[in-house]
Image: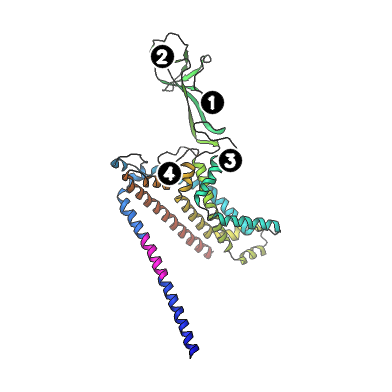
Amino acid sequence: MKKHSANQKREGRRKLFNTSFSVISLLVASLAIVVLVMLISSIFVTGGGALSFSFLTHDYVETQDDPAAAGSGVKQAVIGTTILCLICGAVALPIGIGTAIFLEEFKPRKKIFRFFHSFIQLNINNLAGVPSVVYGMLGLTAFVYMFSVFGRVEVDKPAKIEAGISYSYQVKTLANTWVTLPCTDKTVQKLIPTELPPGTIAMDQDGNEFELRVLAAGAARPTDPVEKQRTIKSNALISQISAKKPYYFRLPFGKSVLAAALTLALVILPIVIIAAQEAIRAVPGSLREAAFGMGTTRWQMIRETVLPSATPGIMTGAILSMSRAIGEAAPILVIMGAIKADAYTNLMEKTTTMPVLIYGMASHSNNGYEPLAAAAIIILLVVLLLINSFAVFFRYRAEKKYKLA
């Protein structure tokens, strides 16, 4: 009887512990849901009134006037985020999926190579938990400055290796109008030569070419207005200008869209690799053995058997990793800074993104930007929700298709 009573007490304590733990877990989960609902409700209450079609089609406007802040929008941020994520996905997804295939399907047999394989796998698992700001510092060294292999990045100084750009000089004539001179090199000159080569051709503001003359020191100034527009002073100050094509490229990349996109690719690369590995690992070994039994090579087995089976998991992981890239702000701030309004022109220029613009609006001293920041958060949340929904839908369709096949 005593033994039976002791068992009942232990069973009662076990049930009490299980019930208490279940109640505590439910309360914690409920608290998290309540906090989340309050945050989302607060965002919608604050920014719901600022949502409009013009908010999506207008660029950011910097102002200290509350009414004028309502004219700001997120157009450039949406464009910048789209471009960054396209480049990031084009770089990270093929490399990540290919790496996962190599690590799972081409495991080495020799001891030294197995050690190297394990070392790579360990570092990939560790990199998945590294804060994104650390990747920003890595991208700053590897992509912005490229370890100074191609020279230093200096403001208003041409890069040593570049393409898709043309330089020219501008100087004012005696008529106080700007004319353009051809640039013979990339050196930023400060003074025009005392004597220009005979037949030096310049271009006026209307695009008309003419022979430029230099007024020597002490010489009489021309009185004819047309001659004044074609004459400059000796040693006149000039400035260098450049015209960049959409395909402009330079080394090192500098603080540019391309450097930021490659840094984001580093951020999501471990996630893509691990997700793809898990999907490949879930493919039954019997399928591989059946493929080998039919006389296929290893690559044929991977291409025709493993990848179709693992596609739902691989694509789900890829889409979810891209949703993380869309919401990253720290690496972008490290690479390009808190840019709010720069328009995208080419991959070597800076631009803004949605998370960076939200950060700028939320930290602005003008309270008129607070509703705009909340509206931008709503847009970003909707985009992330759509991406996650697409991932679930794609996985469901892919699994259904594979089962039917």
Mark 4 belongs to which amino acid?
A: Ile
Look at mark 4 in the image and give the residue it sits on: 79
Q: Badge 2, how many Cα within 10 Å: few under 14, some, many 20+?
A: some
Question: Which mark sits nearer the N-terminus, 1 or 4?
Answer: 4
Q: CA distance from mark 1 to mark 2?
A: 28 Å
Name which quarter of the figure residue 163 lies in. top right
Residue 341 left/right relative to 160:
left
Does the magenta segment cover residue 32? yes
For the point 50% across and 88% down, the residue is: 3
The amino acid marked with disc number 1 is: Thr
* Residue 187: image tag: 1
Q: Secondary structure at mark 1?
A: loop
Q: Secondary structure at mark 3?
A: helix
Q: Nearer the viewer, residue 298 or 226?
A: 226
Numbered tag placed on residue 147 in the rendering: 3
Q: Select label 3 or label 1 by which is in front.
A: 3
* Residue 228: image tag: 2
Q: Nearer the viewer, mark 4 or mark 3?
A: 3
* Residue kind at label 3, given as amino acid type: Phe
Is disc 4 placed on a helix, strand or loop?
helix
Which is nearer the N-term, disc 1 or disc 2? Answer: 1
Amino acid type indicated by mark 2 = Lys
Looking at the image, is mark 2 or mark 4 earlier in the sequence? 4
Give neighbour class at mark 3: few <14, some 14-19, many 20+ (Cα, 10 Å): few
How far separated are the C-alphas under marks 3 and 2?
50 Å
